Image: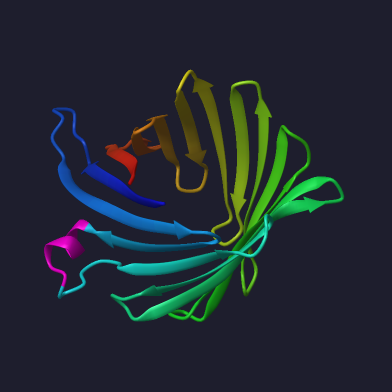
Amino acid sequence: MTTLSVKASTKFSGVSKDLTAASNGEGLFTLKHKQGDVTASLEFTDKTAQDLAALQGPVRALVEYRVNSDLEVHAGYDLSVKSYRVGAEYHGEVADRKVSLKAHYAEADKTVDGEASLAIDSDNKATLTFSNADVTSVKYSYANGDYTLEPSYCLRKQAPSLSVSKKEGKATYKASYNVKSEKATVEWNQKPWKVAAAATAGAKGLGKPTVTATWEKTYSF
């Protein structure tokens, strides 16, 4: 099976009271072909499509191989910067608990990064991200009906955050706040659309927001 995913986004920065703002847009394309347990994909931007010879923007080729129902390995190469990336993902159960482990090695900066999560039960999940040097962040998710509460902490920046999301029909609404940066974000997501508005909100008042609108759809052929 072959699929083409198209993602287009437009960002409006520093929206003023009279609704004027600086804007810029970009497009991302991902072409995938699956044959048995192997999936090959090519990812590129609209800038790449306009000038193939220059290879502007990221141009990534990726091959994924599903070893079994729990384990997947993959290798990728970014043609624009001539750098490879390899990794593996495990999604299974340990002591009747759902666990997930992802780890990747990037040649460009010689680092390992990854994510580990443990589902305590159907409503509670703990997640941490790590690098080859240390644990970088921790997050806890608690789901109650249509609501999900997610407190998190970035160890590198020593920054706590909190987000609350709510599902309503096919739409999801989310509000989040980073205590250290004083950045507040509200999102609305209903496929194929997502709209997010972010601004500083602290002792100095409310800053000019940045609004991002994203459209994403996958075609099969």
Q: Position of residue 57 (x, y in %)?
A: 25, 66
Side (left or right) of 190 relative to 146: left
Side (left or right) of 10 relative to 177: left
Which residue is drawn at the image coordinates 33% and 55% (left, top)?
30
Q: Nearer the viewer, residue 54 or 180?
A: 54
User: Quick check: 62 above or below 115?
Assistant: below
Which residue appears farthest toward the top when viewing the image? 169
In the rendered structure, does residue 16 fall within the stretch colored magenta? no
Q: Position of residue 52 (x, y in %)?
A: 16, 70
Q: Nearer the viewer, residue 17 or 124?
A: 124
- Tell me which segment is drawn in magenta: 46-52
- Find residue 137 and report its image quarter: bottom right
User: Quick check: 111 above or below 164?
Assistant: below
Q: Position of residue 133 (x, y in %)?
A: 63, 74
Q: Nearer the viewer, residue 113 or 64?
A: 64
Residue 19 seen: yes
User: Quick check: 187 above or below 65?
Assistant: above
Residue 104 seen: no
Which residue is drawn at the image coordinates 72% and 32% (left, top)?
123
Q: Main secondary structure of the magenta part?
A: helix
Which residue is drawn at the image coordinates 29% and 47% (left, top)?
6
Which residue is drawn at the image coordinates 21% and 36% (left, top)?
15
- Find residue 17 and report its image quarter: top left
- Find residue 66 and report its image quarter: bottom right
Side (left or right) of 79 relative to 109: left
